[in-house]
Image (cartoon, rainbow, N blue to C red):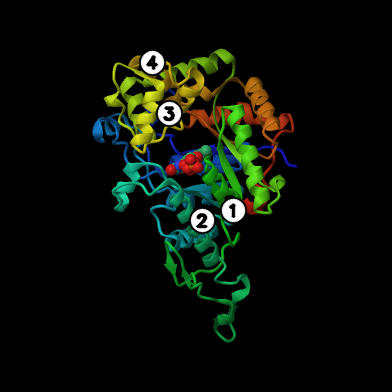
């Protein structure tokens, strides 16, 4: 069993006011590629194993039914396709891996398999594919869908999507490429095959017109949290992302995943979960708390409401002055919105009969939108203690997808200069090896 693997989430380094906070870049603005090249070098030096970009293509538009508030305050926008940025980051690093997200609900597997194969070459075998089912109407509308496909159907499509990608990556055998300079013979046609896939969602002839990449199959990551999402993870994912910050639900996720892996005849000991965990580290606990307060100060009621409405798929501007929690949950279900996050946890904490005012609701929501209700805030010793304890209590397989709500580059600098040296000193980290593929480096 290896130590903790550490990933770092670069999805929101320039949104939600982070671009303007103390410690932000001076003279560089998103999407300047040099910012990301510098972050990649810093993270690799510190021993981070994976840099991750999540994705969603829609601008939040649920709150008050329009994009204007999200555009005005930079809430979850702008978001670019980060594939070319990863190519640039790979040229200035040697070991660190890169995770990229595409939606199996909206994209086509031939395009994604081909792109990831190219990225596997450019990165020297350091690419991971986070495949997501997508949950937001704003994304669906960009791809010609009036509304989001049913939840479980999205996972059926995801399973077929990954099956097609894998078949395409196998459609050219690694030893098919001959490159015989004497005769000019390039490849052995007996080792290059169409896939002739005809399925419920996709018809793909194949083969991929590509040279196999160093990993052949880029590492596949999946973060489903529902029973159907976990079943999909067990079926095909090499690595799992989970929501950190709540031990009981992490243990539940680990248990359900292990059962699902066994049902697929896979060994649960071989499959790690990286827990998404927001940390704020300071030289002292007081410094860390002051940084947390800076984050808090950005979020007014409207920015909180934009964020929550987008993630729930429900326009919270329609909330009455006071309401019963169970009533709101039922209303979300009836609107095909997601009660899983904030509303679900408020019902669990206070009970469905309990009444809440609109202001109280947004107060709770602020902790959720900022992630501060589940963040680990403190000096390096106390944050390292918390991570080690949580790692042991969740099966000691995988590690953390850390994130910081602070400005970049200072948020990553704190983690690199304070937290990771402390974890290394304790012998808690798994070390990535130069020359190995990401698949080899992230094995548990
Ligand atoms: C670390 C982490 C990263 C995620 N990244 C994305 C993302 O980039 N885009 C996205 O649409 N969903 C993302 N998700 C959400 C999951 O893909 C999934 O929708 C969520 O866990 C709910 O699971 P369910 O569909 O099984 O209910 C992420 C989840 C986690 C834990």
Mark 4 or 3: the one toward you: 4
Real-space Cα separation, disc 1 to disc 4, in angstroms: 41 Å
Which type of secondary structure does the marked residue at label 1 adopt?
helix
Mark 1 or 4: the one toward you: 4
Q: Earlier in the sequence, mark 1 or mark 2?
A: 2
The structure residue drawn at horizontal position 61% and vertical position 36%, both measured from the top left corner, is: 46
Instruction: Establish if 371 lies above or below 434.
Output: above
Q: Residue furthest top?
A: 286
Within the image, what quadrant is residue 265 found in?
bottom right
Please say if the residues under marks 3 and 2 sit with CB atoms less than 8 Å apart: no
* Residue situated in front as seen by the camera: 229 or 70: 229
Q: Position of residue 113 (x, y in %)?
A: 48, 61
On residue 24, the disc is: 3
Ligand 1 closer than 8 Å to label 1 CB: no
Please say if the residues under marks 4 and 3 sit with CB atoms less than 8 Å apart: no
Mark 4 surroundings within 10 Å by alpha-carbon count, few (fewer than 14), some (14 through 19), many (20 or more): some
Q: Position of residue 186 (x, y in %)?
A: 55, 80
Q: Which residue is mark 2?
A: 159
Which type of secondary structure does the marked residue at label 4 adopt?
strand
Mark 3 surroundings within 10 Å by alpha-carbon count, few (fewer than 14), some (14 through 19), many (20 or more): some
Q: Earlier in the sequence, mark 3 or mark 2?
A: 3
Quarter of the image where the C terminus is located: top right
Please say if the residues under marks 1 and 2 sit with CB atoms less than 8 Å apart: yes
Instruction: Establish if 294 lies above or below 203.
Output: above
Which type of secondary structure does the marked residue at label 3 adopt?
loop
On residue 235, the disc is: 1
Q: Earlier in the sequence, mark 4 or mark 3?
A: 3
Report whether 248 appears left or right of 293: right
* Residue situated in front as seen by the camera: 295 or 342: 342
Q: Earlier in the sequence, mark 1 or mark 3?
A: 3
Instruction: Establish if 305 lies above or below 237.
Output: above
């Amino acid at each position: 069993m290896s130590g903790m693997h550490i990933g770092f989430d670069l999805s929101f380094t320039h949104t939600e006011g982070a671009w303007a906070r103390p410690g932000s870049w001076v003279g560089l603005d998103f999407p300047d590629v040099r910012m990301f090249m510098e972050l990649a070098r810093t993270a690799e030096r510190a021993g981070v194993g994976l840099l991750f970009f999540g994705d969603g293509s829609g601008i939040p538009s649920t709150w008050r039914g329009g994009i204007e508030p999200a555009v005005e305050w930079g809430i979850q926008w702008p978001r670019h396709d980060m594939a070319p940025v990863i190519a640039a980051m790979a040229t200035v690093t040697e070991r660190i891996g890169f995770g990229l997200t595409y939606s199996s609900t909206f994209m086509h597997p031939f395009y994604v398999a081909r792109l990831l194969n190219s990225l596997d070459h450019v990165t020297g075998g350091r690419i991971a594919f986070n495949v997501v089912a997508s949950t937001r109407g704003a994304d669906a509308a960009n791809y010609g869908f009036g509304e989001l496909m049913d939840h479980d159907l999205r996972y059926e499509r995801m399973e077929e999507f990954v099956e097609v990608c894998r078949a395409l990556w196998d459609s050219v055998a690694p030893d098919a490429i001959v490159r015989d300079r004497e005769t000019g013979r390039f490849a052995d046609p007996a080792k290059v095959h169409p896939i002739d896939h005809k399925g419920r969602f996709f018809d793909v002839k194949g083969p991929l017109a590509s040279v196999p990449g160093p990993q052949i199959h880029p590492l596949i990551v999946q973060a489903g949290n529902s029973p159907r999402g976990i079943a999909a993870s067990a079926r095909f994912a090499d690595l799992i992302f989970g929501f950190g910050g709540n031990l009981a639900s992490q243990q539940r996720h680990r248990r359900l995943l292990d059962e699902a892996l066994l049902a697929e005849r896979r060994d649960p000991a071989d499959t790690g979960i990286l827990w998404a965990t927001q940390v704020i580290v300071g030289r002292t606990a007081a410094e860390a708390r002051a940084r947390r307060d800076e984050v808090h100060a950005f979020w007014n009621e409207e920015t909180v409401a934009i964020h929550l409405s987008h993630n729930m798929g429900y326009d919270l501007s329609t909330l009455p002055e006071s309401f019963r929690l169970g009533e709101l949950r039922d209303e979300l279900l009836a609107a095909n919105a997601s009660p899983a996050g904030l509303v679900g946890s408020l019902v669990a904490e206070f009970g469905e009969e309990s009444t809440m005012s609109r202001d109280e609701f947004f107060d709770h929501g602020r902790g959720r939108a900022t992630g501060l209700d589940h963040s680990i805030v403190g000096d390096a010793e106390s944050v390292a203690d918390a991570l080690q304890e949580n790692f042991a209590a969740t099966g000691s397989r995988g590690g953390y997808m850390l994130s910081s709500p602070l400005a970049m580059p200072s948020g990553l600098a704190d983690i690199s200069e304070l937290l990771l040296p402390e974890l290394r000193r304790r012998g808690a980290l798994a070390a990535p090896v130069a020359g190995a593929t990401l698949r080899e480096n992230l094995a548990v």
